[in-house]
Amino acid sequence: MSRRIPAPADQSRRSFLRAFGVGTSCAAAALAGCEVAEIRQDGAVGSLDFDVTTYPALATVGGMVAADAGLSKLLLIRVSDTEVAALNRVCTHAACEMIPDAIGKWDATAKQLTCLCHNSTFDATGKYLTGPGGVADLPSYPVTFDAAAGTGTVDLGGA
């Protein structure tokens, strides 16, 4: 047996749903804004510290790893003895997530990243090189890397 809870006399079902929909949309937008602000204030999105013990692939030139920092999905690529590049790992063509050696491949000789979904290619700075539909550049992030210590920091505020 179901019971029906009567609406207040001055509120129709349509006006209730309209108010509820607007209210929840505003609340969701406000909450999403607060969540992003909180993440940025506590530094989780401001920078990412890394080292070669956590990401062993970065110990050698040509190594590439996926890393998450808050909402940022990154590829860290050991481009040379002294340089690590940080790129957004979501391809700008069809939003494929370039997981290393599955959907994303780094060619250390050509110094280019290929999204294996549709073969779009990018250089170590994220600049679009070739592929379908004139894809946009990948966001890139400044990296400070100490090769002797095997440690570095990605500045996620610099996209």
Image (cartoon, rainbow, N blue to C red):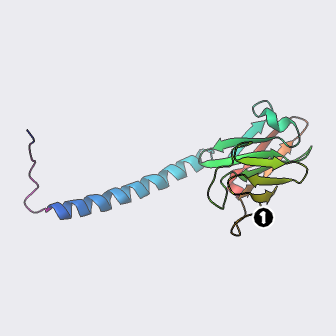
Magenta extent = 3-12
Name the side, left or right, on which 60 lies relative to 113.
right
Give the structural element (helix, strand or loop) at label 1. strand
Q: Main secondary structure of the magenta part?
A: loop
In the figure, 69 relative to 55: above or below?
A: below
Magenta stretch: includes residue 10: yes
Q: Quadrant of the C terminus?
A: bottom right
Residue 46 showing in the rendered view:
no
**Percent coordinates x, y for residue 15 in the rendering:** 19, 64
Pick whichever, 103 or 157, lies toward us.
Answer: 103
**Left or right: 22, with 114 as reference point:** left
Residue at point 56%, 47% (across, down): 39
Q: Position of residue 154 (x, y in %)?
A: 74, 47
Mark 1 surroundings within 10 Å by alpha-carbon count, few (fewer than 14), some (14 through 19), many (20 or more): some
Res 81 → quadrant: top right
Amino acid type, residue under disc 1 in the picture: Thr
Q: Is residue 16 left or right of residue 44?
A: left
The percent position of residue 89, horizontal first and vertical second, equals 69, 51
**Magenta run includes residue 74:** no
